Amino acid sequence: MTTSQLIDLSHTIENGLITYKGLPSPVICDYLSREDSKKFYAEGTSFQIGKIEMVSNTGTYIDCPFHRYENGNDLNDTPLEHFAELEGLVIRNPFQENIATDADLFRDLEIGGKALLIQTGWDIHWNTEKYFNDHPFLTENAALILKEKKVRLVGIDSHNIDDTRTNRRPVHTILLGNGILIVEHLCNLSAIPDENFIFNAIPPKFKGVGTFPVRAMARLHRIS
């Protein structure tokens, strides 16, 4: 008998969370509080309607080509199958050993059409000052080989998939320029196997937006 287990790979978004220094934190509050709603409904009935003000690069989020390219596909135009039900593969490159993930780790992999997730362990620094600086990243050569191998999506449990110590963004440029989606700020990758899982990272269907938070998850197959 085969059963499924869902593993959450997303950080929690809360009021005041700083995901990226220089960008504003989300403001999460009531638009209509439960107390104020009582006057509209029968005795004992109340509702809450929330109000959220935030930039789209908040929490665990996905990048579509429009994030980098004016004429690239936005969230609305990106096919649903690029976000959902992707065969997944995890590469583990601990930040304690090397913060750069290079092409050599991918040369012998069959990753065409798959979601490739890079576990560095950097998520242990989430919501701390250390998270923003000297973080793990992919090299430009890594991005080039991922393009050649036609990977569908690349995710990482780090602050950025590019090296932010410079103002160049070659990994975003190469991957998004070839329709390869990026998920940043993943977490909990240690809870999933190297392969034999299905990855999902589905955002709302917004037009004119190239990034947005996702509830990233892995679906594991269990045979009992």
Image (cartoon, rainbow, N blue to C red):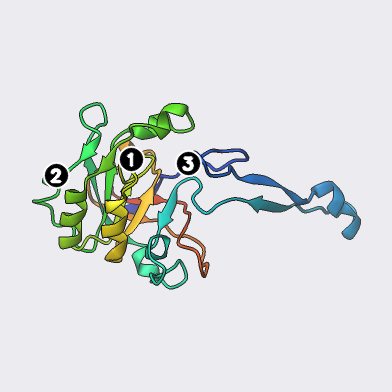
Q: How many circles with numbers are drawn on the protein?
A: 3
**Residue for point 42% across, 60% down:** 67
Report how far apart the C-alphas of labels 3 and 1 lie in the structure. 21 Å
> Residue 152: where, in percent of width, then height?
27, 62
Answer with mark 2 or mark 3, whichever residue precedes in sequence. 3
Query: Mark 2 is on which residue type?
Result: Leu
The answer to whether residue 1 is visible is: no
Image-based side of 169 in relation to 211, left or right: left
Query: Mark 1 is on which residue type?
Result: Leu
> Residue 101: where, in percent of width, then height?
21, 41
> Residue 9: where, in percent of width, then height?
40, 44
Give the residue number, with chain letter if any, for mark 2. Answer: 105
**Residue for point 30% across, 41% down:** 163
Answer with mark 1 or mark 2, whichever residue precedes in sequence. 2
The circle on residue 173 is: none
Image-based side of 102 in relation to 52, left or right: left
Image height of 121 relative to 111, above or below: above
Give the residue number, with chain letter if any, for mark 1. Answer: 189
Query: Mark 3 is on which residue type?
Result: Tyr
Image height of 8 relative to 148, above or below: above
Give the residue number, with chain letter if any, for mark 3. Answer: 20
Which structural element holds mark 2? helix
In the rendered image, which quarter contains the N terminus? bottom left
Residue 149 occupies quadrant: bottom left
> Residue 203: where, in percent of width, then height?
47, 60
Which structural element holds mark 3? loop
